[in-house]
Image: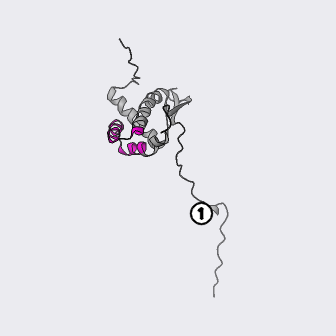
Amino acid sequence: MRHLKRTAKLGRTSEHRNAMLANLVCSLIIHKRVTTTVAKAKAARVVAEKMVTLGKKGSMHHRRLAAARLHQEDAAKILFKEIAPAFKDRNGGYTRIIKMNQRIGDSAQRAILEWVDFISEAPEAPEETPAAAAEGKPEAKPEEKNS
């Protein structure tokens, strides 16, 4: 009987599935948003929300558990320093799935998996340099005096 066995297999072995979901969650932590299929997004949401719960607890034991699940130390550091503190007042539902159009190759339903209410420090646009401002205008060459 398959009672309480709701794991989405995603056509992969358990090792491959765990590695793929860990990589997907690490990409979500680093980039704050990933585009994938709906089935993978639903499977990764469970892992991502458990990682945020570990991040909110914040002890050394929970850091080691998160690092063991994610396999990437830099993603675990971002999780504990940036993402978990942003959700300290929220009791769950840290991610959202936004459905998109179908993929052209195999018509798989695509989705965006992103953090809810997470305001990231987006890099500011570089200020326009005088050379970049003058790209559309022909430059006036300084006159040279021949004496």
Q: In this view, does 147 lie to the left or right of 93?
A: right
Q: Which residue is drawn at 51% across and 36% down?
A: 114
Instruction: Name the colouring of the figure.
Output: one colour
Can residue 24 be seen here? The reply is no
- Crowding around mark 1 (Cα neighbors within 10 Å: few <14, some 14 to 19, many 20+) is few
Q: Residue at x 54, y 44 (%)?
A: 119
Residue 96 position within the rendered picture, expressed as x and y whole percent measured from the top left: 52, 32
**For residue 132: magenta?**
no
Residue at the top extreme? Answer: 1
Can residue 45 be seen here? The reply is yes
Quarter of the N terminus within the rendering:
top left
Residue that numbered label 1 is attached to: 129
Residue 22: name its quadrant: top left
Residue 78 position within the rendered picture, expressed as x and y whole percent measured from the top left: 42, 45
**For residue 60: magenta?**
yes
Quarter of the C terminus within the rendering:
bottom right
Amino acid at the residue labelled 1: Thr
Viewer-closest of 21 and 50: 50
Residue at the front extreme? Answer: 89
Q: How many marks?
A: 1
Viewer-closest of 92 and 6: 92
Q: In this view, does 31 lie to the left or right of 135?
A: left
The magenta stretch is 55-80
Viewer-closest of 23 and 70: 70
Where disc 1 sits, the SS reads: loop
Query: Does residue 30 sit above or below 108 in this rendering?
Result: below
Q: Main secondary structure of the magenta part?
A: helix
Query: Does residue 22 sit above or below 7 in this rendering?
Result: below
Query: Does residue 6 sit above or below 124 in this rendering?
Result: above
Residue 4 position within the rendered picture, expressed as x and y whole percent measured from the top left: 39, 17
Q: Residue at x 66, y 78 (%)?
A: 143
Viewer-closest of 37 and 59: 59
